[in-house]
Image (cartoon, rainbow, N blue to C red):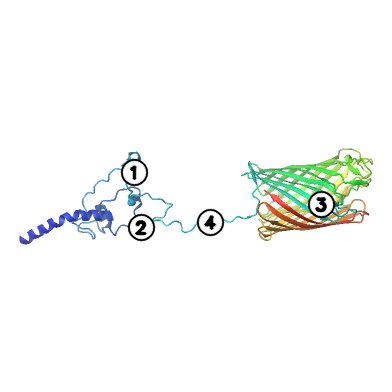
């Protein structure tokens, strides 16, 4: 009995300390809990009662004492857990709840922020700052936003020193002021595309041979991607320039060459039927010549040279691979002169027929373009004029062997009219090789090599024109650059009075936006 009384007395002395101890253990948890609080607890779920926690830690839910369970603190495992209190709706939150300090163990989880193991640790900020990606071309013109188009205008002013101011056989040296205005506009539409490219150049002599002229061209294009693999294209262009001294039409006794105006446009429709590609294009080209100014005074009319060409092309191609599409093409048209009979009594209106075979190729950014060969023939309404015909070769190839280097090759074949009595015209083969190299981000080099071969119909006369040009452009910033270029042209002809040589050097400043 004495031992029993001593045990009861010790129990009654320890009882007041067990309740605070149990409360402290409840708040701090135990070592079986994970360091990072459970997501359900952080979303607002009240802490589980000690019994549930003890049941989760117990290896066996059967009778007997479980490891980690103190019978003096925890109730028996078989005791019924108290029901969890109901959650209040968000509208029931009171100001006291808002002002009360948050419970770090019941905080909501933010998936964008890493969970800190120690809630008392203060954040130290990001270790790395967000770095802006480098620009592809830090010296590219920013352009001017106008609706859905981005405009990039530029103005170039410089001086040209040349050995032959007018490019003719009797040309003399001169120093000229040269002003060029350029405009490029491109759309940023999602499906279709449109663009405008144009330039105009004005030259005037400062010293030497008196020369004053202006030339320019503008082109507008439109591409429409229609439904069911249909595609429509449109183009409209205008050009005005003095007739070249190397033109096959020779006008004697003139003080200056007549100004030539050209208006051209086309509308095309393309359809893809699996690997079969069909295309139909209609073209119109209008040529207008102003009067030539005579050296003795007065003007010489050139209206008999005004004409309009209507033509159509039909192309059929088959895609043998994603990179190669061979095609065949047929074309036909009619050239109509404004004056049915020219001053010498010839009817020069006629029909145009041609056919060619070639291939399109596209090997990505490195290589692409097309090349074709065929035959072209133009017959005249006047039987005294023989038909003008020739084999044709046309090419448009782009090649980029490495980043920052672009090489282009373009070849064309065209039939040229004439006003010489009894002659049908000439055939002109033109070839241009261009190159551009970005030496540095603000330094660009460019070069051009060209050769033109003109064969006069019905005779052994011929012209060969060699062209070479090289230049450098140094951009001081996005808006201003310095350009220098040198050029050479040689006209070699077996016709008396047509051969000439021209050497020129240009230095100018470009401002752009």
Between marks 3 and 4 in the image, the one whose residue lies nearer the viewer: 3
Residue wearing tag 2: 118
Residue wearing tag 4: 131
Residue 90 image offset from top left, x and y in percent: 35, 41
Q: Residues within 10 Å of mark 3 (few under 14, many from 20)?
A: many
Residue 321 image offset from top left, x and y in percent: 67, 54
Q: Residue at x 41, y 50 (%)?
A: 110
Cβ atoms under marks 2 and 4 closer than 8 Å: no
Q: Earlier in the sequence, mark 3 or mark 2?
A: 2
Secondary structure under tag 1 reads: helix
Q: CA distance from mark 4 to mark 1?
A: 39 Å
Q: Residue at x 83, y 51 (%)?
A: 206
Residue 279 image offset from top left, x and y in percent: 72, 45
Q: Is residue 467 visible?
A: no
Q: Quadrant of residue 221?
A: top right
- Which of the two residues, 226 or 2, is positioned nearer the viewer here? 2
Residue wearing tag 1: 98
Query: How many numbered discs?
Result: 4
């Amino acid at each position: 009995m004495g031992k029993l009384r001593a045990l009861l007395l010790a129990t009654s002395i320890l009882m007041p300390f067990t309740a605070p101890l149990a409360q402290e253990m409840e708040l701090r948890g135990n070592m079986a809990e994970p360091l990072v609080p459970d997501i359900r607890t952080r979303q607002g779920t009240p802490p589980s009662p000690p019994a549930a926690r003890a049941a989760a830690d117990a290896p066996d839910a059967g009778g007997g004492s479980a490891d980690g369970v103190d019978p003096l603190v925890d109730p028996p495992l078989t005791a019924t857990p108290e029901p969890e209190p109901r959650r209040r709706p968000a509208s029931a939150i009171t100001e006291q709840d808002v002002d009360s300090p948050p419970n770090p163990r019941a905080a909501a989880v933010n998936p964008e922020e890493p969970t800190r193991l120690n809630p008392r640790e203060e954040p130290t900020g990001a270790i790395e700052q967000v770095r802006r990606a480098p620009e592809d071309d830090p010296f590219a013109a920013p352009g001017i936003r106008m609706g859905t188009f981005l405009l990039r205008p530029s103005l170039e002013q410089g001086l040209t020193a040349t050995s032959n101011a007018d490019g003719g056989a009797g040309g003399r040296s001169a120093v000229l002021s040269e002003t060029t205005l350029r405009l490029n506009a491109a759309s940023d539409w999602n499906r279709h595309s449109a663009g405008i490219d144009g330039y105009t150049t004005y030259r005037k002599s400062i010293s030497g041979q008196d020369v004053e002229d202006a030339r320019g061209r503008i082109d507008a294009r439109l591409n429409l991607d229609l439904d069911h693999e249909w595609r429509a294209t449109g183009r409209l262009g205008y050009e005005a320039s003095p007739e070249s001294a190397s033109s096959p039409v020779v006008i004697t006794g003139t003080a200056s060459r007549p100004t030539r105006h050209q208006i051209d446009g086309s509308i095309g429709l393309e359809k893809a039927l699996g690997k079969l590609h069909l295309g139909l294009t209609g073209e119109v080209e209008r040529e207008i010549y102003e009067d030539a100014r005579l050296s003795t005074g007065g003007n010489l009319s050139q209206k008999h040279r005004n004409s309009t060409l209507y033509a159509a092309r039909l192309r059929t191609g088959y895609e043998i691979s994603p990179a190669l599409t061979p095609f065949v093409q047929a074309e036909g048209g009619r050239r109509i002169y404004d004056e049915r009979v020219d001053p010498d009594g010839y009817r020069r209106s006629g029909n145009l027929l041609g056919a060619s075979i070639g291939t399109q190729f596209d090997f990505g950014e490195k290589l692409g373009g097309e090349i074709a060969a065929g035959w072209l023939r133009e017959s005249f309404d006047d039987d005294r004029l023989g038909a003008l015909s020739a084999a044709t070769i046309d090419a448009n190839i782009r090649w980029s062997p490495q980043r920052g280097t672009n090489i282009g090759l373009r070849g064309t074949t065209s039939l040229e009219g004439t006003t010489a009595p009894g002659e049908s015209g000439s055939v002109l083969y033109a070839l241009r090789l261009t190159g551009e190299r970005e030496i540095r981000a603000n330094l660009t080099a460019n070069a051009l090599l060209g050769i033109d071969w003109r064969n006069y119909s019905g005779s052994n006369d011929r012209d060969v024109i060699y062209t070479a040009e090289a230049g450098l452009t140094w951009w001081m910033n996005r808006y201003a650059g310095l350009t220098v270029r040198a050029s050479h042209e040689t006209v070699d002809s077996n016709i008396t009075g047509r051969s000439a040589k021209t050497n020129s050097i240009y230095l100018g400043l470009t401002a752009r936006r």
